[in-house]
Amino acid sequence: MASELEPEVQAIDRSLLECSAEEIAGKWLQATDLTRELYQHLAHYVPKIYCRGPNPFPQKEDMLAQHVLLGPMEWYLCGEDPAFGFPKLEQANKPSHLCGRVFKVGEPTYSCRDCAVDPTCVLCMECFLGSIHRDHRYRMTTSGGGGFCDCGDTEAWKEGPYCQKHELNTSEIEEEEDPLVHLSEDVIARTYNIFAIMFRYAVEILIWEKESELPEDLEMVEKSDTYYCMLFNDEVHTYEQVIYTLQKAVNCTQKEAIGFATTVDRDGRRSVRYGDFQYCEQAKSVIVRNTSRQTKPLKVQVMHSSIVAHQNFGLKLLSWLGSIIGYSDGLRRILCQVGLQEGPDGENSSLVDRLMLSDSKLWKGARSVYHQLFMSSLLMDLKYKKLFAVRFAKNYERLQSDYVTDDHDREFSVADLSVQIFTVPSLARMLITEENLMSIIIKTFMDHLRHRDAQGRFQFERYTALQAFKFRRVQSLILDLKYVLISKPTEWSDELRQKFLEGFDAFLELLKCMQGMDPITRQVGQHIEMEPEWEAAFTLQMKLTHVISMMQDWCASDEKVLIEAYKKCLAVLMQCHGGYTDGEQPITLSICGHSVETIRYCVSQEKVSIHLPVSRLLAGLHVLLSKSEVAYKFPELLPLSELSPPMLIEHPLRCLVLCAQVHAGMWRRNGFSLVNQIYYYHNVKCRREMFDKDVVMLQTGVSMMDPNHFLMIMLSRFELYQIFSTPDYGKRFSSEITHKDVVQQNNTLIEEMLYLIIMLVGERFSPGVGQVNATDEIKREIIHQLSIKPMAHSELVKSLPEDENKETGMESVIEAVAHFKKPGLTGRGMYELKPECAKEFNLYFYHFSRAEQSKAEEAQRKLKRQNREDTALPPPVLPPFCPLFASLVNILQSDVMLCIMGTILQWAVEHNGYAWSESMLQRVLHLIGMALQEEKQHLENVTEEHVVTFTFTQKISKPGEAPKNSPSILAMLETLQNAPYLEVHKDMIRWILKTFNAVKKMRESSPTSPVAETEGTIMEE
Ligand SMILES: [Zn+2]
Ligand SMILES: [Zn+2]
Ligand SMILES: [Zn+2]
């Protein structure tokens, strides 16, 4: 065997092997200038061990390094043979209760869905199997590498923070004990010395940027002319390009080139040629020349072999430090102290700071080695974790900017440590109050999105590939914001309030740049030539969805914060739409003796935007005012009287009208980008902070204004005002205009508008809007999903919105509303709606897509036929509104509403003379049904001293006044009951008439019946 080795290699080995670790350590113990001694030793030996030829010999290098370099350090540290010294340290150690196992790529990790504070809290397999969570609902994933086991972290788990192995010994005192008490003074002093010198050496050599010159104290007397041509990885060039280039540049085989490329990709760099300077330079220039044509060239450096040698040893040293501190928490504490000690240059001069700030300049391999060391040292020491968190926050802006301009993946950036720091609730809270972290994250984010339009809104149009690339990277900042917000405070200090609200201000600035972004104009005549960019804006909205919800949750947890946030949000909305008229012409609308001032604005002719996050946040906060009862407890602290309902509803209404017009086919020429936007607006991923909130904002508006005024403005925005305000307009319209498309369009718009009114009155299942709780809300979602068809678990989950913890809340309520039908021989198990839940079915449930709605209608009618019941699908009985929204129901009995209902029924009665549709009629019937249900409930809950002011039955019994003398709504319904062309709707009309009679009876027998004669005027106040 020996004869096969090259003689030169053997010779070197022999000279090195003569070193004695004990002797060297002895010399160091006597040294007056230990730094100098150590550096001389390294300067002499490192280049003799590492980088002796074209290819690395890792095993040989490691063996020699241990013998000549690390061994003496271990002797020095222990003051004796480390074979005895380390076990002693280990025995004296009181180990921490944190597991901290750092995950490898592909390793399984477990999180408990019942007990984890958030989904980033995970356990390694060993800890999981030894924990109580193995019997809970858990989620298994495979690690992408990086991150560590949270076993033992009491902040990460609501219950069962320790596995059996890391169980806290009950006799021990909780934490906070100084781990140094278990070490002798001597060991402490020597460890400190060796760690300080070696850690500094490693940092200095790793961030060293000169290519042929060593730091002064490591420079050698005679320097050989041996260089490496070092190739670095980037994410721009493909494997094939690199392999092809290498074959040309260094004249290697394809197999060798593949080997080089693989190592470059894995470690971040690899020498591709070894030899004298000229020889390496030549290879470099070929590589650069060959790869600079399309993009920036591959990064190549010609480096002196001694620099590479020291850098390789520097990495070895960091791993060595990581393993040495495993022997004792005291050693780990010393390393943390050394790492965070400020250097001679003040701020940012600690070793930890210097490494972080050089992160994006380091190659992949170096980064992952020092990240691992940070995780096993700084993040495992409770005291230093805090100090490190502060350093991380102070450098946050710079680290993120470096990351955005760097082209490496997130997992290779030190910025990725944010998940380890920000998800610790106590650290997040401290960083918010002491370092203003929320504002810093949001401002950093905004700094990276500089493209704005004339109004200061984000602009993603004509977006270059580079901007798109940067935008993707910038999104990780939103994730950081999410981490910071993930655990909601249970207690608020004044500092926390102040800093949260500062962060909230910054957040509003961000939303302000989104309010009205990507405005669109209806295309008439030709189709659009190029689909406009829309995805970036939606990506931003989608990524922010949970953050917006979490912001609201934070506000909800403190009354003072909620009040201030509400005021701030309103102020920003006023800035956005100060003069909400935006220069449009004022006009007056009047129907049935009511009139209102508004502006002339047509969605189909002017700019309109789907992005209204400020309006929607205010809607969310408004609901919270109601839910938390702050609106009733402190009305004097709220600017409710400053609210202008027409201003609040204007933009959300435009957005909903846009959807209606798209549905009516009026925007066909705008292409798919618009279709996609409308789709996402309603989609389960976005709707909670888009569509749902627009509905809430309109509900807010109606509950604060005269419903007649609201309806007239609504008619006007739907561009239907003429039809309902001009007597017989409909007749003229259908007879004069033969253009079928326009008739069809208007019919659809009327249907859509009626649908929207149904939603405004019927959607009261958000806690705060109606008197319900979160469970009722999720139950209702499930009932409606299962009304379409029985569903498998996974299918059902997909149809429900997930919260920031990826939970839908389904499991806690599913048994109350569904049966589980076990799978047959093939196929999946299915959830089926319980029969008793069918009565809660609402045909106009607002989260149904068109297709779902018609499927659900069909399924429910079929079910009724099977049960030999009539097939009417009357509106369900609804929970009462919260007081803040209570007056909303009056929209159903307002004059304008009755006029709309009467007009459409009239069209149906004289069915040949008008353009009308069955869907339109069906919706009117539904609305009448809702009004009857409402009145019935009012009567059921009536008390002696209250007058029932909801008098729909009386209003629909009255015929129209002279000169028209049109029949009453009731009379028309009676006529329609016998209309042969309305067979499908007969059951529903019959149900209405039956309910009408029941309500009438109730009213007659109710104690307040004498008031009935004058009721008509009560509602007008
Ligand atoms: Zn573990
Ligand atoms: Zn454990
Ligand atoms: Zn658990």
Image: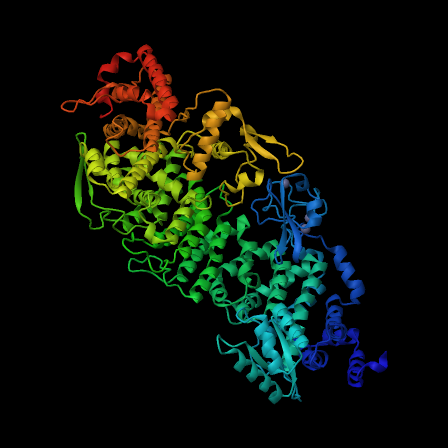
Q: Residue at x 68, y 78 (%)?
A: 42
**Residue 504 in sight from this viewpoint:** no
Residue 447: x %, y % from top left: 40, 62
Q: Quadrant of residue 16?
A: bottom right
Task: Name the side, left or right, on which 641 lies relative to 295.
Answer: left
Q: Quadrant of residue 555?
A: top left
Q: Is residue 453 above or below residue 872?
A: below
**Residue 487 in sight from this viewpoint:** yes
Task: Name the side, left or right, on which 514 lies relative to 140.
Answer: left
Could you say which is closer to the camera, residue 545 or residue 662? 662
Q: Is residue 196 above or below residue 1013?
A: below
Q: Is residue 450 above or below residue 940?
A: below
Q: Is residue 513 above or below residue 966?
A: below
Task: Name the side, left or right, on which 490 lies relative to 904.
Answer: right
Could you say which is closer to the camera, residue 951 or residue 524? 524
Residue 522: x %, y % from top left: 29, 51
| Residue, far top | 1005
Residue 296: x %, y % from top left: 49, 75
Q: Quadrant of the C terminus?
A: top left
Identify the image's colour scheme: rainbow, by chain, secondary structure or one colour: rainbow
Could you say which is closer to the camera, residue 907 or residue 565? 907
Residue 529: x %, y % from top left: 34, 60
